[in-house]
Amino acid sequence: MNHSRWIAIVFAILLLASLPATVAAVDRTSIDDPFSERSLSKVYPGADSFSEPSGEYRTVEAYRQVDGERQLAGYVFLTSNVVDVEGYGKEPIEFLVAMDTDGTIRGVELVEQHEPFFDRVSAIQRLRQFGHQMVGMSVTEEVTLREAGSDEYHVDALTGASVTTRASIETVTRSARIVAREKGIISESDVDGAANETAVSNRSSAERRMTLGDLGRGTELARWDAGTPAGPNASAPIQLYAAPIEAAPVRESLLGDANATDANATVLWVGLAAPGSPDPERLRLHQWTRSSAPPVRETQVEGVDWSAALVVPTLDTTRPFVLDLTVDGERIRRTYGPGGLAVRRPVDAAAAQVLPAWVGTVESAWEDNWSTALALVLFLGGILGVFTFRSRLCRRAGVTVNRLRIGTLGATLVFLGWYHPTQPTTQQIAILVRELISWATTGGFRWALFFSAPLVAITFIYVALVIPKWGRGVFCGWICPFGALSELLYKATPWEYELPREYHVKLEKIRYPLFVAIVVGFVVSTDFGATLAKVEPFKAAFYSSLVTDPVYIAWSALLVVSGAFMFRPYCRYVCPLGAGLALGNILQREPIQRYDLCGDCVKCQTDCDFQAIEDDGSIDQFQCFQCSVCVDNYHDPEGCPVVLQYDNEHGFTVDAWRDPALIERIRPEDRTTD
C-alpha cells in the first residue's frame, strides 16, 4: 500500500472517529429532582420547610419560623407546570422559581433546557446565571435589556442568544404572574401582557363620576369618526375617543380607587359612542412592534355609550400608538399621536399594523447591533462589487483575479472571522428545513429563529441572493472566514501535499451525507443535531471563549493544522455547510466561460487547487469555489493554449489585453459559455 493511500485512510478514520456514535441526549440538567428538599432549599434559602406540591400549577408553599411561629413565606413552582414557552431549540426552558408573599422573585434555578448553543458546561452556567439576574424583581415589573425605567427591571442579555434570552424572561415572568394572581398577591390590573384577548370580558364597573366634557378638560382627548358598523342596529357612525390619564384625581374619578393602579403605569381611557351595544369584541394596542391585549376595566363617562380604562405599563404616550378594535364585526384601527392628535398612518402606526408579531422579539438584537450590521452590509456589498467587476479591475491593475481573491480573503478573515465573528453554520440551514416542515405540517414558522442573530442573518440573505447567479463559490471562495483561514495558512507554510485525483473524487462526496445527517438530526432532535454539528470547527476557530470540550477542540485543531499541509481539506472533503450551499448551484444561471477546445490541454485542471476541472475541460459546478484561475487563463493570450493555438493558426499576433476582440474572433463553433 503506497504512502498516498495510507494518508487517505488515516484521514477517513479520523473523520469517522469524530462523529457521535449514539443518539443519546446531552445531559443538560441543573437540578435532578426540582421538588426535593435540597432543590427547594436551594431556590428559596430563607425558608425552613416546604409543603407537598398541590393545586392547578403544582405549587409548593414555603414556610419559615418567626418568633416560634410557622409562617407562610412564599411559593415555589416549576415554570413548565404553568406556561409553555418554546426556546430556540423548539422546546421549553424549565426553571424552578421561588416567590415571596409580596410578589418578589426570591430564587430562579435552571432545571432543564434544550437550546442548541448551550450544550457545554460554560454555556449552561451562563444560562443559569442569567436566570439569577431576575432574583429581587417584582412580578409587576417589566424586564428590559436596556436602561430601566421606573416600572422596569434591567437584566443583561445572553450574548448572541436573543431567542433564548427572550424565552427565559417570558417563561419566568409569565409563570410568576399567573401564580401570583392565583394566590391573590396581585390583581388582573397590576400587570399587562399576561392577559389575553378574552380580557375584554373581564370587567368591573365604577360609579358614574364625570362627563366627556370634564374628561376633555382634564387631559388630551383625541376623537375619530370611525365609520358605520355593519351590525343590525347600525344607523349612525361610531365615534372613537382615547386619552392617556396622567392626573391622579382623574384616575381616581374614573376607577373609583386611587390605589387601583401603580402610579407609574400608563392608564389609557377609550370611549365609544355608537347606537346599540358598542362593546368591542376585540381590543388591542400596538406600538411599533409591540402588541398587547391589556386588561379592560369598564368606566362610566357621560357622553359615550361605552368606555374603559386600560392599564398598560409598557405604553409610551410620547410616541404614536394604534388602537385596534372590532365593534359589531367592524375592525377599527386608529392612531393616537402625541399631544392628543388623532392621526391615521404615521410610520409607527404602519409598522405596528404591517410588521408581524415576531419582529418585536428580535427588535432589540437589531437595535443593539445596527452599526455592526450596517458595516457588514457595506463590507459584503463591497465584496460583491469586487467580484462583479473582477475581470475589469484586474486588467487595469495588471493582476490576476485569483490574486485579488486572496487579498479579499485576508480582509474577510480579519473582519468576519476575528473582529466581528460572522461564520454561518449548517445549524441555520437545518433549522430552516425543520421550520419549513413545521410550516407544511402545522402552519407554524418561527422567523425569529433566523433574525435573532443579525450578522448571521445578513450573511445568509447575502448568500441566498448570489447563489442563483454565481453559485455558492462567491461565499465559499471569497467570504467564508474559516475557508480564508485554511487557505491563507496553506499559502503561508512551505508544505504542500495533494491527494491523488482518484481519492479526491471519492472523499469530496463525504460532506453530502454529513449535511443530510445534520439536517435530519435537527428535525428528529435538537440535541442530536447539535451533537452531529460538532463536526464543524467554526466555534473553536472564532468563538474560542465559548468552547471547553477537549475532544471538540482537538478535532478543530486537527482540521486547522491539516490546512497547513493540504489545500483546504476541510472545505473540499468535510464541510457540510459547503455541501448544503453547493446543492443550490443547480440554480446557477451564469456559468464560467469555457472553450469547446478545452480538455485538449490540462492547464486549467493543473492550476485549479480546488480540482474542480474535469478531464474533458468542463467545470464541476458542485466543487467550484469561483477561484477564477480558469477565468484568468481564458483571457490570457500568452497562457491559454487554446488562444495560442488559434492565434498561431491564423497569424494573429495582437495582445488580448490591448484588443479584447481577440476572443470574439475565435470561431463561434469553438466558443461556449459552459
Image: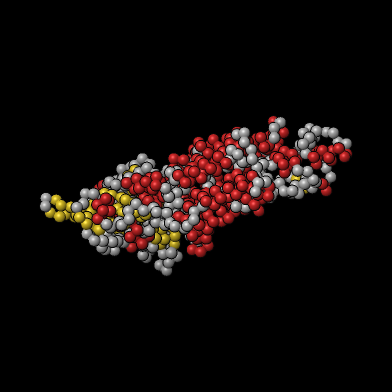
Work out whether residue 9 or residue 487 is closer to the camera in this orientation and state it: 9
Q: Which residue sits at x=57%, y=35%?
A: 411
Work out whether residue 257 or residue 183 is closer to the camera in this orientation and state it: 183
Q: Residue furthest top?
A: 397
x and y percent of residue 187 in the render?
A: 26, 56
x and y percent of residue 303 in the render?
A: 33, 57
Q: How many dots with numbers?
A: 0
x and y percent of residue 633 in the render?
A: 74, 39
x and y percent of residue 491 in the render?
A: 62, 35
Q: Which residue sits at x=53%, y=43%?
A: 558
Q: Is residue 555 visible?
A: yes
Q: Which residue sits at x=62%, y=52%?
A: 509
| Quadrant of the image occupied by residue 381 | top right
Q: How is the image coloured?
A: secondary structure
Q: Residue furthest left?
A: 68
Work out whether residue 212 or residue 124 is closer to the camera in this orientation and state it: 124
Q: Which residue sits at x=37%, y=42%?
A: 156
Q: Residue furthest bottom?
A: 232
| Side of 20 relative to 486 (left or right) | left
